[in-house]
Amino acid sequence: MTASVFFGCTFIAFGPAIALFLFTIARDPLRVIFLIAGMIDSVKCLQMLKHKPLLVGELLVAQGFVPAQH
């Protein structure tokens, strides 16, 4: 009984993580490496934009996404 409860709780706890590993990382690990590298680049870009809010607003006006205020 103790072993069955242990394995049942283990599979419930770690089942989703094991499934994600088997369906993504185990099949194509290079794709995961590229996705993480791209994510790091995107986060850096967002951090830079957070420190330059006026630049983003000027860029949106220059591209025509937001009408200029007079």
Image: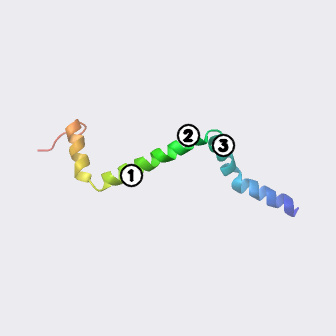
Which numbered disc flags the more N-terminal residue, 1 or 3?
Answer: 3
43 vs 58, left or right, is: right
Q: Tag 2: residue type?
A: Arg
Q: Which residue is mark 3?
A: 26
Q: Mark 1 touching mark 3, by CB under 8 A?
A: no
- Residue furthest front as drawn: 30
4 vs 47, left or right, is: right
Q: Which residue is mark 1?
A: 44
Residue 47 in picture, x, y percent from top left:
36, 54
Q: Tag 1: residue type?
A: Lys
Residue 2: image tag: none
48 vs 20, left or right, is: left
Image quadrant holding the C terminus, namely top left
Q: Is residue 50 above or below residue 33?
A: below
Residue 38 in picture, x, y percent from top left:
46, 44
* Label 2 CA crowd tier, 10 Å (few <14, some 14–19, many 20+): few
Which numbered disc flags the more N-terminal residue, 2 or 1?
Answer: 2
Residue 51 in picture, x, y percent from top left:
29, 56
Q: Residue at 26% across / 53% down in the picture?
A: 52
Question: Marks 1/3: CA distance?
Answer: 28 Å
Question: Marks 3/2: CA distance?
Answer: 10 Å
Question: Marks 2/1: CA distance?
Answer: 20 Å
Q: Which residue is mark 2?
A: 31
